[in-house]
Image (tube, grey):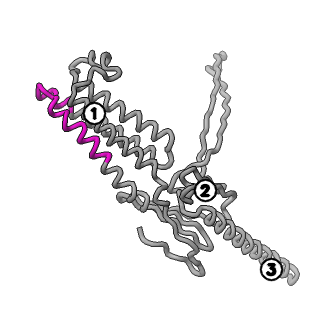
């Protein structure tokens, strides 16, 4: 994605990228794959499939054998880790991790099932295929985390905040004017406090930086009335609540020196508000002068 093009009379105040440790949890999630690859390899080598939880249940599935049962439990481990990543890091990469782990799990099961259908002995094949697939995804994931982090660039000018990202041919850009910001929230975890990075969320009335969780309950009743057919009555109520979102596309995620970033945004909001106020006064005076002339 190209660099920011400044507008007329616009000045770039700050350019930021997420801190090198801001996506540390992604390193941990992919590192767990490497550990899981070693564990599954050890079970294949020492033939410990019977010690797996749920082994007695899975082995009763038609066409299942020891190797397929081990592969199913291996895939279950991937799904559990992927679900936890999606639950805890939904807005900051967790959903993509869940999809990736789910795809790897289904791929492993399909390949092992096909091999078991074509070949009698799947032990030797599973010995290298399952651990190799797991380790490959783990290594590639760890290598791609830094590229993912560097794909985000945040620009702060005297007029607006621009959030840009470009990763794997997917480009996105979002802009927000300072006079649209209603609140600023800064968050720092333990690691962020130690290494001086955190997330700055500019909250706007249009929903930038927030997400809505809505639920609706509908109650209905119907009655037969002679000559009129069926009459139905329905009533509903909707409740919604806003939550803070930590999506790197919608906030300044894991940026260095977040307090300085927050202060700069606050100053720009005050300046922009002052300029807008002066414009409104000027327009009001102009209208009053026009009315006097008439």
| Circle nearer the N terminus (2, 3) | 2
- Return the x and y of residue 86 as percentages of the image width and height: 46, 40
Q: CA distance from mark 2 to mark 3?
A: 38 Å
Residue at 59% x, 61% y is 258
Residue 279 drawn above or below residue 103: below
Identify which residue, 259 or 245, lies in the foreground.
Answer: 259
- Return the x and y of residue 58 as percentages of the image width and height: 30, 20
Bounds of the magenta span? 112-138
Q: Identify the disc placed on residue 200.
A: none
| Circle nearer the N terminus (1, 2) | 1
Q: Residues within 10 Å of mark 2 (few under 14, many from 20)?
A: many
Identify which residue, 31 or 67, lies in the foreground.
Answer: 31
Residue 294 drawn above or below residue 43: below
Residue at 49% x, 44% y is 89
Q: Residues within 10 Å of mark 3 (few under 14, many from 20)?
A: few
Secondary structure of residue under mark 2: strand
Q: Identify the disc placed on residue 201.
A: 2
Q: Identify the disc placed on residue 40.
A: 1
Residue at 23% x, 21% y is 64
Magenta segment, principal secondary structure? Answer: helix
Cβ atoms under marks 2 and 3 closer than 8 Å: no
Q: CA distance from mark 1 to mark 2?
A: 41 Å
Residue 219 drawn above or below residue 144: above
Comparing labels 2 and 3, the label whose residue is closer to the camera:
2
Secondary structure of residue under mark 3: helix
Q: Residue furthest bottom?
A: 293
- The quadrant of the image that shows the N terminus is bottom left
Q: Identify the disc placed on residue 286.
A: 3
């Amino acid at each position: 994605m190209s660099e920011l093009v400044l507008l007329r009379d616009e000045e770039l105040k700050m350019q930021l990228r997420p801190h090198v440790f801001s996506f540390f949890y992604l390193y941990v999630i992919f590192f767990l794959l490497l550990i899981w690859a070693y564990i599954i390899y050890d079970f294949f080598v020492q033939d410990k499939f019977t010690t797996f939880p749920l082994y007695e249940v899975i082995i009763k599935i038609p066409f299942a054998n020891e190797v397929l049962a081990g592969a199913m439990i291996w895939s279950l481990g991937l799904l559990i880790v992927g679900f936890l990543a999606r639950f805890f890091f939904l807005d900051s990469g967790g959903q993509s991790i869940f999809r990736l782990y789910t795809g790897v799990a289904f791929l492993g099961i399909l390949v092992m099932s096909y091999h078991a259908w074509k070949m009698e002995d799947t032990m030797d094949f599973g010995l290298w295929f399952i651990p190799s697939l797991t380790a490959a995804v783990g290594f590639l994931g760890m290598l791609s985390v830094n590229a993912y982090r560097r794909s985000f660039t945040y620009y702060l000018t005297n007029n607006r905040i621009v959030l840009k990202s470009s990763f794997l041919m997917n480009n996105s850009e979002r802009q927000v004017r300072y006079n649209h910001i209603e609140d600023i929230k800064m968050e720092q975890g333990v690691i962020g406090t130690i290494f001086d990075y955190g997330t700055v969320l500019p909250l706007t009335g249009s929903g930038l930086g927030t997400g809505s969780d809505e639920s609706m309950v509908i109650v209905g009743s119907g009655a037969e009335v002679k000559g009129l057919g069926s009459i139905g009555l329905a009533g509903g109520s909707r409740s919604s609540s806003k939550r803070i979102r930590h999506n790197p596309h919608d906030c300044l995620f894991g940026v260095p020196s977040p307090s300085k970033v927050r202060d700069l945004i606050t100053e720009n909001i005050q300046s922009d508000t002052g300029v807008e106020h002066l414009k409104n006064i000027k327009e009001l005076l102009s209208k009053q002068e026009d009315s006097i002339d008439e």
